[in-house]
Amino acid sequence: MLEVEDIHTYYGDSYVIQGVSLRVPEHAVVAVLGRNGVGKTTLVRSIIGFTPPRRGSIRFKGVEISRQPAYKIVRAGIGLVPQGRRIFRSLTVRENLEVASLARPPGRASRWTPDSIGKLFPRLRERASHAGVKLSGGEQQMLAIARALLSNPELLLLDEPTEGLAPLLVRELHALIRTLKDEGFSILLIEQNLPFALTLADHVHVMSKGRIVYDAPPADLMHNEAVKSRYLGI
Amino acid sequence: MAYWLTQTFNGLTFGMLLFLLAAGLSLIFGLMRIVNLAHGSFYLLGAYLALTVSQLTGSFLLAVLGAAAVVACLGIVIERLFLRRVQNQELPQVLLTFGFIFVLEDIALWLWGAIPTLLEKPVLFAGSLQIGGIVVPSYRILIVVVGLLIAAALWALQSRTRIGAIIRASVDDEEMARGLGINTPRMFTWMFALGCFLAALGGVMGGALVGMYPGAGFEILVLALVVVIVGGLGSLRGAFIGSLLVGLLDNFGKALFPELSLFTIFAPMAIVLAVKPTGLFGRA
Ligand SMILES: Nc1ncnc2c1ncn2[C@@H]1O[C@H](COP(=O)(O)OP(=O)(O)OP(=O)(O)O)[C@@H](O)[C@H]1O
Ligand SMILES: [Mg+2]
Protein backbone atom coordinates (compact mmCIF):
# COMPACT_ATOMS: atom_id res chain seq x y z
CA MET A 1 0.00 0.00 0.00
CA LEU A 2 2.70 2.50 1.09
CA GLU A 3 6.34 2.18 0.13
CA VAL A 4 8.83 4.67 1.53
CA GLU A 5 12.22 4.28 -0.06
CA ASP A 6 15.39 5.91 1.23
CA ILE A 7 13.94 9.36 1.90
CA HIS A 8 15.97 12.32 3.15
CA THR A 9 14.12 15.26 4.69
CA TYR A 10 15.40 18.63 5.86
CA TYR A 11 14.11 21.69 7.69
CA GLY A 12 16.22 24.31 5.97
CA ASP A 13 19.78 23.22 6.68
CA SER A 14 18.85 20.82 9.43
CA TYR A 15 19.06 17.24 8.14
CA VAL A 16 16.40 15.27 10.00
CA ILE A 17 15.34 12.13 8.09
CA GLN A 18 18.56 10.53 6.95
CA GLY A 19 17.55 7.72 4.67
CA VAL A 20 14.41 5.96 5.88
CA SER A 21 12.71 3.06 4.11
CA LEU A 22 9.62 1.21 5.23
CA ARG A 23 6.53 -0.47 3.86
CA VAL A 24 2.96 -0.60 5.06
CA PRO A 25 1.23 -3.58 3.45
CA GLU A 26 -2.51 -3.60 2.87
CA HIS A 27 -4.68 -4.18 5.97
CA ALA A 28 -1.59 -4.09 8.19
CA VAL A 29 -0.66 -2.01 11.22
CA VAL A 30 2.97 -0.96 11.08
CA ALA A 31 4.45 0.85 14.07
CA VAL A 32 7.37 3.27 14.33
CA LEU A 33 8.86 3.68 17.80
CA GLY A 34 11.57 6.01 19.00
CA ARG A 35 12.50 8.60 21.59
CA ASN A 36 11.64 12.29 21.49
CA GLY A 37 13.13 14.19 18.61
CA VAL A 38 14.37 11.25 16.52
CA GLY A 39 12.27 12.38 13.55
CA LYS A 40 9.03 10.40 13.82
CA THR A 41 6.78 13.37 13.16
CA THR A 42 9.07 14.50 10.38
CA LEU A 43 8.59 11.10 8.77
CA VAL A 44 4.82 11.63 8.91
CA ARG A 45 5.21 15.16 7.53
CA SER A 46 7.29 13.78 4.68
CA ILE A 47 4.63 11.25 3.74
CA ILE A 48 1.67 13.63 3.92
CA GLY A 49 3.51 16.30 1.93
CA PHE A 50 3.94 19.03 4.57
CA THR A 51 7.71 18.72 4.41
CA PRO A 52 8.47 16.79 1.22
CA PRO A 53 11.68 14.77 1.20
CA ARG A 54 14.55 16.21 -0.81
CA ARG A 55 15.60 12.79 -2.02
CA GLY A 56 14.03 9.36 -2.16
CA SER A 57 10.66 8.07 -3.21
CA ILE A 58 7.26 7.53 -1.61
CA ARG A 59 4.76 5.37 -3.47
CA PHE A 60 1.12 4.97 -2.50
CA LYS A 61 -0.78 2.20 -4.30
CA GLY A 62 2.05 2.16 -6.79
CA VAL A 63 1.92 5.89 -7.56
CA GLU A 64 4.77 8.25 -6.71
CA ILE A 65 3.40 10.91 -4.33
CA SER A 66 6.50 12.55 -2.89
CA ARG A 67 6.30 15.53 -5.25
CA GLN A 68 2.57 16.13 -4.85
CA PRO A 69 0.92 18.81 -2.72
CA ALA A 70 -0.52 17.62 0.60
CA TYR A 71 -4.15 18.04 -0.38
CA LYS A 72 -3.69 15.71 -3.36
CA ILE A 73 -1.92 13.13 -1.23
CA VAL A 74 -4.87 13.20 1.18
CA ARG A 75 -7.36 12.90 -1.66
CA ALA A 76 -5.41 9.95 -3.00
CA GLY A 77 -6.38 8.13 0.20
CA ILE A 78 -4.06 8.95 3.11
CA GLY A 79 -5.65 10.24 6.32
CA LEU A 80 -3.70 12.23 8.88
CA VAL A 81 -4.22 12.17 12.64
CA PRO A 82 -1.49 14.57 13.67
CA GLN A 83 0.48 14.76 16.87
CA GLY A 84 -1.28 17.14 19.27
CA ARG A 85 -4.59 16.56 17.41
CA ARG A 86 -4.70 20.04 15.85
CA ILE A 87 -8.45 20.52 16.27
CA PHE A 88 -9.63 23.75 14.58
CA ARG A 89 -10.25 26.08 17.49
CA SER A 90 -12.94 28.30 16.00
CA LEU A 91 -14.98 25.37 14.73
CA THR A 92 -17.56 23.24 16.48
CA VAL A 93 -17.21 19.47 16.63
CA ARG A 94 -19.62 19.12 13.74
CA GLU A 95 -17.82 21.74 11.66
CA ASN A 96 -14.48 20.07 12.31
CA LEU A 97 -15.96 16.94 10.76
CA GLU A 98 -17.70 18.78 7.93
CA VAL A 99 -14.52 20.50 6.81
CA ALA A 100 -12.94 17.14 6.16
CA SER A 101 -15.90 15.79 4.24
CA LEU A 102 -16.21 19.00 2.19
CA ALA A 103 -12.60 18.76 1.17
CA ARG A 104 -13.43 15.63 -0.79
CA PRO A 105 -13.89 16.35 -4.47
CA PRO A 106 -17.60 16.29 -5.35
CA GLY A 107 -18.93 13.06 -6.72
CA ARG A 108 -16.50 10.90 -4.80
CA ALA A 109 -18.42 8.58 -2.54
CA SER A 110 -17.29 8.02 1.00
CA ARG A 111 -17.99 5.35 3.55
CA TRP A 112 -18.78 8.02 6.09
CA THR A 113 -20.66 11.26 6.42
CA PRO A 114 -20.57 13.58 9.45
CA ASP A 115 -23.85 11.94 10.51
CA SER A 116 -23.02 8.30 10.05
CA ILE A 117 -19.67 8.61 11.79
CA GLY A 118 -21.63 9.48 14.92
CA LYS A 119 -22.41 5.76 15.27
CA LEU A 120 -18.74 4.98 15.68
CA PHE A 121 -18.22 7.96 18.01
CA PRO A 122 -21.42 8.49 20.03
CA ARG A 123 -19.78 10.99 22.35
CA LEU A 124 -18.90 13.27 19.45
CA ARG A 125 -22.49 13.18 18.32
CA GLU A 126 -23.66 14.29 21.78
CA ARG A 127 -21.29 17.24 21.64
CA ALA A 128 -21.72 18.15 17.99
CA SER A 129 -22.39 21.81 18.67
CA HIS A 130 -19.61 22.29 21.24
CA ALA A 131 -16.37 23.99 20.30
CA GLY A 132 -13.93 21.27 19.27
CA VAL A 133 -11.20 22.49 21.57
CA LYS A 134 -13.54 22.40 24.60
CA LEU A 135 -13.62 18.60 24.50
CA SER A 136 -11.49 16.53 26.83
CA GLY A 137 -8.16 15.22 25.58
CA GLY A 138 -9.60 11.80 24.83
CA GLU A 139 -12.59 13.21 23.00
CA GLN A 140 -10.32 15.48 20.98
CA GLN A 141 -8.30 12.45 19.94
CA MET A 142 -11.49 10.70 18.85
CA LEU A 143 -12.48 13.84 16.94
CA ALA A 144 -9.11 13.94 15.20
CA ILE A 145 -9.54 10.32 14.14
CA ALA A 146 -13.15 10.82 13.04
CA ARG A 147 -12.09 13.89 11.06
CA ALA A 148 -9.36 11.94 9.30
CA LEU A 149 -11.81 9.14 8.47
CA LEU A 150 -14.12 11.66 6.78
CA SER A 151 -11.42 12.47 4.27
CA ASN A 152 -12.09 8.90 3.13
CA PRO A 153 -8.65 7.32 3.52
CA GLU A 154 -7.42 3.80 2.97
CA LEU A 155 -4.24 4.41 4.93
CA LEU A 156 -4.19 6.21 8.28
CA LEU A 157 -1.16 7.99 9.72
CA LEU A 158 -1.54 8.12 13.52
CA ASP A 159 1.12 10.25 15.21
CA GLU A 160 1.34 9.42 18.93
CA PRO A 161 -2.40 9.03 19.49
CA THR A 162 -1.98 7.96 23.13
CA GLU A 163 0.05 11.03 24.11
CA GLY A 164 -1.43 12.63 27.22
CA LEU A 165 -4.35 10.20 27.55
CA ALA A 166 -5.45 8.52 30.78
CA PRO A 167 -5.04 4.70 30.86
CA LEU A 168 -8.75 4.08 30.45
CA LEU A 169 -8.85 6.16 27.28
CA VAL A 170 -5.73 4.47 25.99
CA ARG A 171 -7.58 1.17 26.24
CA GLU A 172 -10.56 2.61 24.41
CA LEU A 173 -8.29 3.90 21.68
CA HIS A 174 -6.66 0.50 21.45
CA ALA A 175 -10.02 -1.09 20.78
CA LEU A 176 -10.85 1.55 18.18
CA ILE A 177 -7.63 1.02 16.25
CA ARG A 178 -8.26 -2.72 16.34
CA THR A 179 -11.72 -2.10 14.89
CA LEU A 180 -10.28 0.09 12.16
CA LYS A 181 -7.77 -2.59 11.32
CA ASP A 182 -10.52 -5.19 11.10
CA GLU A 183 -12.46 -2.82 8.84
CA GLY A 184 -9.58 -3.11 6.40
CA PHE A 185 -7.60 0.04 7.01
CA SER A 186 -3.84 0.11 6.70
CA ILE A 187 -2.26 2.03 9.54
CA LEU A 188 1.11 3.61 10.16
CA LEU A 189 1.23 4.05 13.93
CA ILE A 190 3.82 6.34 15.51
CA GLU A 191 4.12 5.64 19.23
CA GLN A 192 6.21 5.96 22.35
CA ASN A 193 3.92 3.68 24.31
CA LEU A 194 5.62 0.33 23.72
CA PRO A 195 2.94 -2.10 24.99
CA PHE A 196 0.28 -0.21 23.04
CA ALA A 197 2.23 -0.47 19.80
CA LEU A 198 3.38 -4.05 20.31
CA THR A 199 -0.14 -5.35 20.88
CA LEU A 200 -1.50 -3.68 17.76
CA ALA A 201 1.26 -3.83 15.19
CA ASP A 202 2.04 -6.53 12.66
CA HIS A 203 5.52 -5.14 12.26
CA VAL A 204 7.56 -2.60 14.25
CA HIS A 205 10.37 -0.22 13.35
CA VAL A 206 12.64 1.56 15.79
CA MET A 207 13.96 4.96 14.84
CA SER A 208 17.00 6.80 16.11
CA LYS A 209 18.54 10.04 14.85
CA GLY A 210 16.63 10.06 11.61
CA ARG A 211 17.24 6.43 10.69
CA ILE A 212 15.47 3.12 11.14
CA VAL A 213 17.84 1.15 13.36
CA TYR A 214 15.78 -1.99 13.91
CA ASP A 215 12.74 -3.62 12.42
CA ALA A 216 11.09 -6.90 13.31
CA PRO A 217 7.81 -8.55 14.25
CA PRO A 218 6.55 -7.23 17.61
CA ALA A 219 7.33 -10.45 19.46
CA ASP A 220 11.01 -10.11 18.59
CA LEU A 221 11.24 -6.57 19.90
CA MET A 222 9.40 -7.57 23.05
CA HIS A 223 12.27 -9.89 23.94
CA ASN A 224 15.12 -7.77 22.65
CA GLU A 225 16.27 -6.02 25.83
CA ALA A 226 19.33 -4.54 24.09
CA VAL A 227 17.32 -2.62 21.50
CA LYS A 228 14.72 -1.62 24.07
CA SER A 229 17.20 -0.15 26.50
CA ARG A 230 19.45 1.40 23.90
CA TYR A 231 16.84 3.08 21.67
CA LEU A 232 13.69 3.27 23.75
CA GLY A 233 15.13 3.83 27.20
CA ILE A 234 13.28 0.91 28.75
CA MET B 1 -26.37 69.59 18.07
CA ALA B 2 -26.97 69.34 14.32
CA TYR B 3 -23.25 69.90 13.86
CA TRP B 4 -22.37 66.94 16.06
CA LEU B 5 -24.91 64.71 14.39
CA THR B 6 -23.61 65.63 10.96
CA GLN B 7 -20.03 65.03 11.98
CA THR B 8 -20.92 61.70 13.55
CA PHE B 9 -22.76 60.62 10.45
CA ASN B 10 -19.85 61.69 8.24
CA GLY B 11 -17.49 59.73 10.43
CA LEU B 12 -19.66 56.64 10.20
CA THR B 13 -19.86 56.97 6.41
CA PHE B 14 -16.12 57.19 6.11
CA GLY B 15 -15.85 54.23 8.48
CA MET B 16 -18.04 52.15 6.18
CA LEU B 17 -15.76 53.04 3.30
CA LEU B 18 -12.76 51.99 5.36
CA PHE B 19 -14.52 48.75 6.18
CA LEU B 20 -14.64 47.78 2.52
CA LEU B 21 -10.85 47.94 2.48
CA ALA B 22 -10.16 46.64 5.94
CA ALA B 23 -12.39 43.56 5.54
CA GLY B 24 -10.32 42.30 2.61
CA LEU B 25 -7.03 43.30 4.17
CA SER B 26 -7.90 41.43 7.34
CA LEU B 27 -9.26 38.36 5.56
CA ILE B 28 -6.16 38.11 3.38
CA PHE B 29 -3.92 38.44 6.39
CA GLY B 30 -5.88 35.91 8.41
CA LEU B 31 -5.65 33.32 5.66
CA MET B 32 -2.41 33.93 3.86
CA ARG B 33 -0.42 35.81 6.53
CA ILE B 34 0.27 38.52 3.97
CA VAL B 35 -0.07 42.20 4.76
CA ASN B 36 -1.06 43.36 1.32
CA LEU B 37 0.38 46.88 1.14
CA ALA B 38 -0.94 47.24 -2.41
CA HIS B 39 -4.52 47.08 -1.11
CA GLY B 40 -4.90 50.86 -1.24
CA SER B 41 -3.68 50.85 -4.83
CA PHE B 42 -6.45 48.41 -5.75
CA TYR B 43 -8.82 50.92 -4.16
CA LEU B 44 -7.47 53.76 -6.29
CA LEU B 45 -7.34 51.67 -9.44
CA GLY B 46 -10.99 50.70 -8.89
CA ALA B 47 -11.95 54.36 -8.65
CA TYR B 48 -10.11 55.31 -11.85
CA LEU B 49 -11.44 52.33 -13.78
CA ALA B 50 -14.94 53.31 -12.70
CA LEU B 51 -14.27 56.79 -14.03
CA THR B 52 -13.44 55.37 -17.45
CA VAL B 53 -16.37 52.96 -17.49
CA SER B 54 -18.87 55.58 -16.42
CA GLN B 55 -17.54 57.98 -19.06
CA LEU B 56 -17.97 55.27 -21.67
CA THR B 57 -21.36 53.97 -20.58
CA GLY B 58 -22.81 56.68 -18.37
CA SER B 59 -23.89 54.02 -15.87
CA PHE B 60 -22.70 54.07 -12.27
CA LEU B 61 -23.77 50.50 -11.67
CA LEU B 62 -21.79 49.24 -14.66
CA ALA B 63 -18.85 51.29 -13.46
CA VAL B 64 -18.97 49.65 -10.03
CA LEU B 65 -19.26 46.12 -11.35
CA GLY B 66 -16.79 46.57 -14.19
CA ALA B 67 -14.11 48.21 -12.07
CA ALA B 68 -14.44 45.70 -9.25
CA ALA B 69 -14.38 42.76 -11.66
CA VAL B 70 -11.26 44.02 -13.46
CA VAL B 71 -9.44 44.65 -10.19
CA ALA B 72 -10.46 41.21 -8.89
CA CYS B 73 -8.97 39.63 -12.03
CA LEU B 74 -5.81 41.66 -11.58
CA GLY B 75 -5.69 40.38 -8.02
CA ILE B 76 -5.90 36.79 -9.26
CA VAL B 77 -2.98 37.38 -11.62
CA ILE B 78 -0.87 39.05 -8.95
CA GLU B 79 -1.59 36.32 -6.42
CA ARG B 80 -0.85 33.48 -8.82
CA LEU B 81 2.22 34.92 -10.50
CA PHE B 82 3.87 36.80 -7.65
CA LEU B 83 2.58 36.36 -4.11
CA ARG B 84 2.45 32.58 -4.38
CA ARG B 85 6.19 32.52 -4.96
CA VAL B 86 6.95 34.27 -1.68
CA GLN B 87 4.62 32.31 0.58
CA ASN B 88 5.65 32.45 4.26
CA GLN B 89 8.55 34.80 3.52
CA GLU B 90 7.70 38.03 5.25
CA LEU B 91 10.35 40.37 3.94
CA PRO B 92 9.90 39.46 0.25
CA GLN B 93 6.12 39.83 0.73
CA VAL B 94 6.48 43.32 2.16
CA LEU B 95 8.87 44.37 -0.60
CA LEU B 96 6.73 42.86 -3.32
CA THR B 97 3.42 44.36 -2.22
CA PHE B 98 5.17 47.66 -1.50
CA GLY B 99 6.62 47.56 -5.02
CA PHE B 100 3.14 47.05 -6.45
CA ILE B 101 2.07 50.34 -4.87
CA PHE B 102 4.54 52.19 -7.08
CA VAL B 103 3.80 50.16 -10.18
CA LEU B 104 0.02 50.50 -9.87
CA GLU B 105 -0.01 54.15 -8.84
CA ASP B 106 2.38 55.03 -11.67
CA ILE B 107 0.18 53.24 -14.14
CA ALA B 108 -2.76 55.22 -12.78
CA LEU B 109 -0.78 58.45 -13.08
CA TRP B 110 0.17 57.62 -16.65
CA LEU B 111 -3.36 56.63 -17.70
CA TRP B 112 -5.47 59.15 -15.77
CA GLY B 113 -3.10 62.01 -15.03
CA ALA B 114 -2.36 63.86 -11.80
CA ILE B 115 -5.30 66.23 -11.60
CA PRO B 116 -7.62 65.36 -8.73
CA THR B 117 -10.97 64.16 -10.02
CA LEU B 118 -14.29 63.29 -8.51
CA LEU B 119 -16.45 60.46 -9.80
CA GLU B 120 -19.93 61.54 -10.69
CA LYS B 121 -22.49 60.29 -8.20
CA PRO B 122 -25.30 58.13 -9.52
CA VAL B 123 -28.24 60.39 -10.39
CA LEU B 124 -30.51 58.59 -7.99
CA PHE B 125 -28.28 59.50 -5.07
CA ALA B 126 -27.16 62.98 -6.08
CA GLY B 127 -29.56 64.81 -3.78
CA SER B 128 -29.97 64.92 -0.04
CA LEU B 129 -32.53 64.11 2.58
CA GLN B 130 -33.73 65.90 5.67
CA ILE B 131 -33.51 63.50 8.60
CA GLY B 132 -34.16 64.59 12.17
CA GLY B 133 -33.13 68.17 11.67
CA ILE B 134 -29.96 67.50 9.69
CA VAL B 135 -29.37 67.41 5.98
CA VAL B 136 -27.91 64.13 4.84
CA PRO B 137 -26.57 63.61 1.33
CA SER B 138 -28.31 60.52 0.01
CA TYR B 139 -25.02 59.27 -1.45
CA ARG B 140 -23.66 58.94 2.08
CA ILE B 141 -26.70 56.88 3.00
CA LEU B 142 -25.96 54.67 0.00
CA ILE B 143 -22.42 54.12 1.31
CA VAL B 144 -23.71 53.13 4.73
CA VAL B 145 -26.24 50.73 3.20
CA VAL B 146 -23.63 49.15 0.91
CA GLY B 147 -21.20 48.83 3.83
CA LEU B 148 -23.82 47.18 6.03
CA LEU B 149 -24.87 44.82 3.26
CA ILE B 150 -21.30 43.77 2.58
CA ALA B 151 -20.67 43.31 6.29
CA ALA B 152 -23.78 41.12 6.61
CA ALA B 153 -22.86 39.12 3.51
CA LEU B 154 -19.30 38.52 4.73
CA TRP B 155 -20.57 37.55 8.16
CA ALA B 156 -23.03 35.09 6.65
CA LEU B 157 -20.37 33.68 4.34
CA GLN B 158 -18.01 33.12 7.22
CA SER B 159 -20.31 31.77 9.87
CA ARG B 160 -23.23 30.25 8.00
CA THR B 161 -21.81 28.50 4.96
CA ARG B 162 -19.65 25.48 4.34
CA ILE B 163 -17.05 27.57 2.55
CA GLY B 164 -17.03 29.75 5.64
CA ALA B 165 -16.19 26.77 7.84
CA ILE B 166 -13.33 25.92 5.49
CA ILE B 167 -12.12 29.53 5.60
CA ARG B 168 -12.20 29.59 9.40
CA ALA B 169 -10.42 26.26 9.58
CA SER B 170 -7.70 27.58 7.30
CA VAL B 171 -7.33 30.73 9.38
CA ASP B 172 -6.91 28.52 12.46
CA ASP B 173 -4.42 26.09 10.94
CA GLU B 174 -3.80 26.28 7.23
CA GLU B 175 -1.46 23.31 7.14
CA MET B 176 -3.94 21.05 8.91
CA ALA B 177 -6.65 22.13 6.46
CA ARG B 178 -4.37 21.01 3.64
CA GLY B 179 -3.79 17.81 5.58
CA LEU B 180 -7.52 17.09 5.30
CA GLY B 181 -7.52 17.49 1.54
CA ILE B 182 -8.46 21.15 1.21
CA ASN B 183 -6.94 22.89 -1.78
CA THR B 184 -5.95 25.93 0.24
CA PRO B 185 -3.83 27.54 -2.52
CA ARG B 186 -6.88 27.75 -4.74
CA MET B 187 -8.97 29.15 -1.92
CA PHE B 188 -6.29 31.78 -1.27
CA THR B 189 -6.57 32.93 -4.86
CA TRP B 190 -10.35 33.31 -4.59
CA MET B 191 -10.21 35.07 -1.26
CA PHE B 192 -7.48 37.40 -2.51
CA ALA B 193 -9.69 38.19 -5.49
CA LEU B 194 -12.62 38.85 -3.13
CA GLY B 195 -10.47 41.25 -1.12
CA CYS B 196 -9.44 43.07 -4.30
CA PHE B 197 -13.07 43.21 -5.41
CA LEU B 198 -14.08 44.86 -2.13
CA ALA B 199 -11.15 47.30 -2.26
CA ALA B 200 -12.16 48.36 -5.76
CA LEU B 201 -15.78 48.66 -4.65
CA GLY B 202 -14.55 50.92 -1.86
CA GLY B 203 -12.58 52.89 -4.42
CA VAL B 204 -15.64 53.48 -6.55
CA MET B 205 -17.76 54.49 -3.55
CA GLY B 206 -14.97 56.71 -2.27
CA GLY B 207 -14.21 58.13 -5.72
CA ALA B 208 -17.54 59.92 -5.68
CA LEU B 209 -17.12 61.00 -2.04
CA VAL B 210 -13.51 62.06 -1.52
CA GLY B 211 -12.23 61.78 -5.08
CA MET B 212 -9.09 60.38 -6.71
CA TYR B 213 -5.62 61.86 -6.86
CA PRO B 214 -2.10 60.46 -6.85
CA GLY B 215 -1.32 59.11 -3.40
CA ALA B 216 -4.96 58.61 -2.43
CA GLY B 217 -4.45 54.86 -2.36
CA PHE B 218 -1.57 55.09 0.06
CA GLU B 219 -3.44 57.51 2.32
CA ILE B 220 -6.38 55.20 2.73
CA LEU B 221 -4.11 52.16 3.07
CA VAL B 222 -2.55 53.72 6.16
CA LEU B 223 -5.98 54.19 7.73
CA ALA B 224 -7.09 50.69 6.77
CA LEU B 225 -3.94 49.28 8.35
CA VAL B 226 -4.77 51.17 11.54
CA VAL B 227 -8.26 49.64 11.42
CA VAL B 228 -6.91 46.13 11.05
CA ILE B 229 -4.35 46.60 13.81
CA VAL B 230 -6.87 48.15 16.21
CA GLY B 231 -9.60 45.63 15.39
CA GLY B 232 -7.31 42.61 15.45
CA LEU B 233 -5.65 40.94 12.47
CA GLY B 234 -7.86 38.40 10.76
CA SER B 235 -11.07 39.32 12.60
CA LEU B 236 -14.09 40.42 10.57
CA ARG B 237 -15.85 41.86 13.60
CA GLY B 238 -12.64 43.70 14.47
CA ALA B 239 -12.47 45.15 10.97
CA PHE B 240 -16.05 46.39 11.29
CA ILE B 241 -15.79 47.95 14.75
CA GLY B 242 -12.29 49.24 13.98
CA SER B 243 -13.48 50.90 10.78
CA LEU B 244 -16.25 52.77 12.53
CA LEU B 245 -13.84 53.86 15.29
CA VAL B 246 -11.18 55.08 12.90
CA GLY B 247 -13.78 56.70 10.66
CA LEU B 248 -15.14 58.67 13.61
CA LEU B 249 -11.70 59.54 14.96
CA ASP B 250 -10.53 60.69 11.56
CA ASN B 251 -13.58 62.82 11.01
CA PHE B 252 -13.63 64.44 14.45
CA GLY B 253 -9.87 64.82 14.41
CA LYS B 254 -9.98 66.72 11.16
CA ALA B 255 -12.97 68.81 12.24
CA LEU B 256 -11.81 69.71 15.73
CA PHE B 257 -8.00 69.62 15.63
CA PRO B 258 -7.07 69.89 11.96
CA GLU B 259 -3.38 70.33 12.72
CA LEU B 260 -3.37 67.20 14.92
CA SER B 261 -5.52 64.92 12.77
CA LEU B 262 -2.98 62.10 12.52
CA PHE B 263 -2.37 62.27 16.25
CA THR B 264 -6.06 61.72 16.99
CA ILE B 265 -5.85 58.41 15.10
CA PHE B 266 -2.48 57.11 16.14
CA ALA B 267 -2.73 57.98 19.83
CA PRO B 268 -5.84 55.81 20.36
CA MET B 269 -4.19 53.06 18.30
CA ALA B 270 -1.14 53.17 20.55
CA ILE B 271 -3.37 52.98 23.63
CA VAL B 272 -5.29 49.98 22.27
CA LEU B 273 -2.07 48.19 21.43
CA ALA B 274 -0.60 48.95 24.84
CA VAL B 275 -3.66 47.48 26.57
CA LYS B 276 -4.34 44.66 24.11
CA PRO B 277 -1.43 43.94 21.76
CA THR B 278 -3.55 41.66 19.55
CA GLY B 279 -6.11 44.41 18.89
CA LEU B 280 -9.69 44.57 20.14
CA PHE B 281 -10.87 41.26 18.66
CA GLY B 282 -7.59 39.64 17.71
CA ARG B 283 -6.23 36.41 19.08
CA ALA B 284 -2.65 35.70 19.93
N1 LIG C 1 9.59 22.91 11.88
C1 LIG C 1 10.83 22.54 12.26
N2 LIG C 1 11.91 23.28 11.92
C2 LIG C 1 13.16 22.91 12.28
N3 LIG C 1 13.43 21.82 12.99
C3 LIG C 1 12.42 21.03 13.37
C4 LIG C 1 11.06 21.35 13.03
N4 LIG C 1 10.26 20.38 13.51
C5 LIG C 1 11.08 19.52 14.14
N5 LIG C 1 12.36 19.89 14.06
C6 LIG C 1 13.53 19.16 14.58
O1 LIG C 1 13.62 17.93 13.90
C7 LIG C 1 13.97 16.89 14.80
C8 LIG C 1 12.94 15.79 14.71
O2 LIG C 1 11.71 16.27 15.19
P1 LIG C 1 10.37 15.42 15.14
O3 LIG C 1 9.27 16.32 15.56
O4 LIG C 1 10.27 14.76 13.85
O5 LIG C 1 10.67 14.35 16.28
P2 LIG C 1 9.70 13.28 16.92
O6 LIG C 1 10.40 11.98 16.84
O7 LIG C 1 8.36 13.35 16.34
O8 LIG C 1 9.67 13.74 18.43
P3 LIG C 1 8.46 13.63 19.50
O9 LIG C 1 8.48 12.22 20.01
O10 LIG C 1 8.85 14.59 20.56
O11 LIG C 1 7.23 13.99 18.81
C9 LIG C 1 14.08 17.52 16.17
O12 LIG C 1 15.44 17.76 16.42
C10 LIG C 1 13.34 18.81 16.06
O13 LIG C 1 13.91 19.80 16.89
MG1 LIG D 1 6.55 13.77 17.04
Image (spheres, coloured by chain):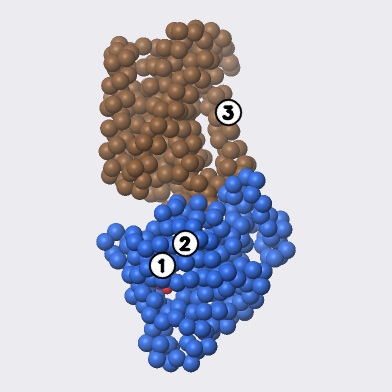
Chain colours: A blue, B brown
- In the rendering, at what x and y percent does residue A204 appear? 49, 79
Left or right of residue B230: residue A182 = right
Q: Nearer the viewer, mark 3 or mark 2?
A: 2
* Three-letter code for the amino acid on which mark 2 is drawn: Arg
* Three-letter code for the amino acid on which mark 1 is drawn: Glu
Q: Mark 3 sits on what residue? A: B149
Label located before the other in sequence (2 or 1):
1
Query: How many angstroms separate mark 1 from mark 3 (CA)?
Result: 55 Å
Tell which subunit mark 2 falls on: A
Residue A83 shows in the view = no
Task: Note whether ligand 1 is within 8 Å of mark 3.
Answer: no
Left or right of residue A93: residue B240 = left
Q: Is residue A172 above or below residue B64?
A: below
Left or right of residue A112: residue B2 = left
Answer with the quadrant where ligand 1 appears in the image: bottom left
Find numbered disc 2 in the image and state the secondary structure of the residue it sits on.
Answer: strand
* Three-letter code for the amino acid on which mark 3 is drawn: Leu
Residue A5: mark in rendering: 1
Q: Are marks 2 and 1 on the same chain?
A: yes
Tell which subunit mark 1 falls on: A
Task: Note whether ligand 1 is within 8 Å of mark 1.
Answer: no
- In the rendering, at what x and y percent does residue A173 appear? 61, 74
Callout 3–callout 2 Cβ contact below 8 Å: no
Find numbered disc 3 in the image and state the secondary structure of the residue it sits on.
Answer: helix
Write the residue at 44% across / 39% down.
B28
Q: Mark 2 sits on what residue? A: A59
- In the rendering, at what x and y percent does residue B92 appear? 28, 42
**For the residue carrying disc 3, how many other residues have a C-alpha within 10 Å: few (<14), some (14-19), or many (20+)?**
few
